[in-house]
Image (spheres, rainbow, N blue to C red):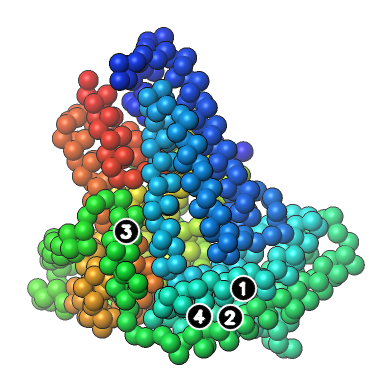
Amino acid sequence: MRKTILLSSLACVMLTACGGDKEKTAENKTYSEEEIKNESAKANAFFDRVFDREVDRDPVKAALLGIKKDYDQWTDISEEHSQKELEIVKANLDSLKSFNPDMLDEQTKISYRLFENDAKQRIDNYKWHLHDYPVNQMGGTQVDMPTFLINVHRVDNKSDAEAYISRLSKVNAMFDQLIVNLKLREAKNIIPPKFVFPYVLNDCKGIISGRPFEKSGADNPLLEDITAKVNTLKDVDDAGKKDLIKRANEALLTSVKPAYEKLIAYWTELEKKATTDDGAWKLPEGDAFYDAALKQTTTTDLTADQIHEIGLKEVERIHNEMREIMKKVKFKSDNLQEFFDFMRTDKQFYYPNTAEGKEAYRVKAVKIIDDMKKELDKLFLTKPKADIVVMPVEAFREKSAGGAFYEDPAPDGSRPGRYYINLYNMADQAIYQMEALAYHEGIPGHHMQIAIAQELKGIPKFRMHGGNTAYVEGWGLYSEKLPKEIGFYQDPYSDFGRLAMELFRAARLVVDTGIHRKKWSREKALAYFKENTPNPEGDNKKEIERYIVWPSQATGYKIGMNKIIELRENAKSKLGDKFDLREFHDVVLTSGPVPLNILEEMVNSWIKKKGS
């Protein structure tokens, strides 16, 4: 059962009339509370209808939301389907015109603006829909498929098991669509940089290793997963279980294996056309594409040059704060680069790269999150019902996956939020950054923000399950700093880790724009990170490779954090003793993810209401 979260604190701020029969005036017209209520109800029903129909067309998204509709199908990823979806977006935008925005309550006005802006952005940006790399070292169909089946596809009964096997049998057809999509990009010379290819080939070969693909060795992760799930079923006898596992074996051999073999063959040939050029500038109309990507990521009109300069200034500020930490720990010199080298190399800051070291890291990460849970009442009025677990990144994708990430809980409570930590190489996971990383990915970071949004009542579904990078990652980065205000980061090295994480995000502004607008090489980007951050070289390398395949994405963190802090400081200044941090966080978190300009409007409305 999902937790009911009342929006009273925000709703009464945003509504110009929280009760009674007062009339509202807009453009010399007056509307009764009843008219506003009815028009708002119609609009919200439309928003939910559009969302539900979109989920109906997307079996993978449905399963992520805990819905078992078309449970034996994969989402259509063909170009034809993509174009049909565009036409549906255009039709929905046209239907929006049937509602009078002046007749909506304030929350529904926000929904109207968000829906309209999102639709227009999807239409305007469709010309860039091939300007990406659907197969890369960070993810893509080749790793998303097994990850989805293992972590999302529940097997509660025989029908679910048969759906799992059916999905296995359809992997070959899905990969045919994927290869067509890759060829469409190839025709436009949209080909990943050369460094991407070995990662993907390694992942693909790893996914079709083990039994039944090989006669000996351990079971393949997919076979291991379906076997374990089938063996727990209570509505299937032993003979039936054996039959299901046999059918799964056949699907792996006749569908999954040829799918990956075809992708490997195509990918091997495509590699011959790849270059070492890394930036978005190399793509058709690359500068215009990158400008559009920055706008979508940051939800601002900041230019690449402005973002680059913000990054340089933030790096300098954080360096100065780090020098204060150096004094606290009585480091042998006042040279910041020497301190960075010390933090990179001293063994006290890293667990051994052994099974025991990896488990020790996981256990400590769980404790950090559990300790933070006990303090949430000091910071929040609204807290999520969904739980969170800490998990190592699975072996089949750990070599290429990012350092840490969060996966949403199922809204129906069937799946907790997951904080994934990549323990492939413990030299890339500094102990002194553990606190900040756990706060960002877990609590009070992504888990609080995403789980609360999913559990909201009174707003349409698209606002509960949407998101933009500046809001989501801005909150995550803000959440790294927040615990310091209630006494965490007592160890100065851990506090340095917090600053190091913020520094990394500031440096991202410099490096992302450097690569994609200023034509920096990977070597120049690596040199900048080495000189200006304490992060290990392997970590820096992975990060830069991430920015290359996800142009602009890394800029959302610091831009979003800066805006949240700016809004908070403005509220504190204007409200004085009336400022309540918990109420501020309610304003930020209890309307779902919104663009930064709308977040500013919401905070300003709260300030006006609170200060009157």
Q: Quadrant of the N terminus?
A: top right
Number of callouts: 4
List the single residue furthest toward the left: 334
What residue does disc 1 label?
175
Distance between mark 4 and mark 3 Cα atoms = 27 Å
Classify 98 as above or below 429: above
Residue 39 in the image, given as x and y percentages of width and height: 48, 23
- Is there CB contact under 8 Å for labels 4 and 2? no
Q: Which residue is mark 3?
A: 292
Label 2 packing within 10 angstroms: few (<14), some (14-19), many (20+): many
Is there any visible trace of residue 303 in the rendered image? yes
Q: Are marks 4 and 1 in contact (CB under 8 Å)?
A: no
User: How far is mark 4 from mark 1, CA to CA?
Assistant: 14 Å
Q: CA distance from mark 1 to mark 2?
A: 7 Å
Q: What amino acid is at disc 4?
A: Val
Residue 193 in the image: state x and y as whole percent. 39, 81
Residue highlighted by disc 4:
200
Coordinates of residue 85 in the picture (x, y in percent): 54, 53
Q: CA distance from mark 4 to mark 2?
A: 10 Å
Residue type at mark 2 is Leu
Mark seen at residue 263: 2
